[in-house]
Amino acid sequence: MGVSFWEDPYPVYKTFQDRSGVFWDEMLEVWVVAGRSAVNTVLRSPAMSSDWLRLNVSESTARDFPELERMLLGWFMLMDPPDHTRNRRALQPFFTRNRVEGLAEEFRDIVATRLELVRPLDGVDIASDFAAPVAGAMLARVLDVPVGVMVGAAVHMTAIASFLAQPHKREFAERAAAAVDRLNGLYRELAPDLSRDSALFPLMGDDPKAPEDPYLHTAHLLSFAGQETTAGLIASGLLHLLREPGLYKEVAAGHADPDAVVEELLRFDTPVPQVPRVALSDLTVDGRTIRAGDRVLVLLAAANRDWHHTRDADVLDFARNQRHMAFGVGIHYCLGAPIARRGAKTAISEWTAAFPEVRLVPESVRWAVGTGFRRLESALVQPA
């Protein structure tokens, strides 16, 4: 796929949906699920597995990079019940909507501090100067860990994201394995000083100097998924608003419902556009039979545009009343959804109010290539 796909994958997604809600791709050797009803069926079906051992077709990863393989086997988002259920339940109290909403004032303080830092600059990169540090600081507060730990962890996440998107590439596995080693060092160093109120504390075991694997693996997962989703939503959301000056001014003036703005941005450009599955047993979807053992690529982003049933699907419309699947559906619904929603709502509202008149430098816009996340790498804005 060329660079143009990473800049705007939606024309390709539309061709997929026009072809069929579900179809077999000979080149990738996967079922591509792009239709809204088909995506809903696949994600809710117990016939589908998220287990990393089943998803990863390369035996060389386990043989050559055992620490990388062990980490991914410890991620509950890559588990099936009952392991998934048990691990998720242990963390659920730290990610409830009520708890995150209770941190709203602290989130505003985080954004205000960052705005004061970038305000004097002649140009601000909304991705690296604003969205990424804000998302990291918010997650640090939710987990009750030092911000510096999140900043350090974020440095290594790109390598892991690239490997997850293309696990068959050895060079990506090598980089991801090196990132895991550094992350292990980071979180082992943190363990003796970890707050007892942290979501990670119960997972550490009896000896902080030798924390157990569940602590390390969950720390990696939360650092990865929590920062990537929130930062991606904030950065891409601001970019799309800047490309629609009328909508940007509406948000800046407080004339748009902040909740509606965030929900429409999630529909319009989904931070996690796709998720993989493997069939445990045969499943018929839209008249096509997915056989046990078949791999499946579920396109959340395509389902959210839903061109066949959505009027002006490629247009941002804050008055739109349409449910989306940006955080998935079923048992794997994103645990961190309340953080992403509250974080984006606060960051976008406060940013636009602080900078009601800015211009985007079009040639500065660059999207990440070769990753399963929709990640804006850079987009520079300057005073209008």
Image (cartoon, rainbow, N blue to C red):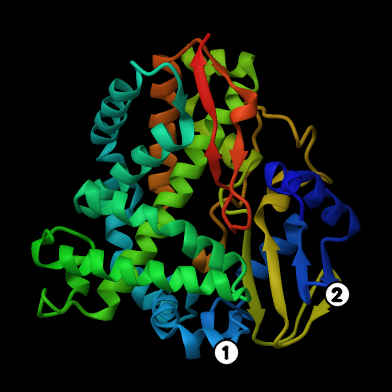
Residue 112 in picture, x, y percent from top left: 29, 25
Task: Please tell me whether residue 195 is drawn above or below residue 375 in the rendered image.
Answer: below
- What residue appears at the point 52 percent right and 80 percent down from the top-left corner? 52
Residue 7 as seen in the image, left or right of residue 89:
right
Asked if one can make out residue 334 in the rendered structure from this viewpoint, the answer is no
- What residue appears at the point 47 percent right and 81 percent down from the top-left corner? 81
Residue 113 in picture, x, y percent from top left: 26, 27
Residue denoted by label 1: 59
Q: Amino acid at mark 1?
A: Glu
**Badge number at residue 354:** none
What SS does tag 1 mark? helix
Q: Nearer the viewer, residue 3 or 216?
A: 3
The nearer-to-camera label among 1 and 2 is 1
Image quadrant where one finds the N terminus: bottom right
Q: Which quarter of the figure has residue 349?
A: top left
Residue denoted by label 2: 26
Q: Amino acid at mark 2?
A: Glu
Residue 254 as seen in the image, left or right of residue 171:
left
- What residue appears at the point 63 percent right and 52 percent down from the top-left corner? 369
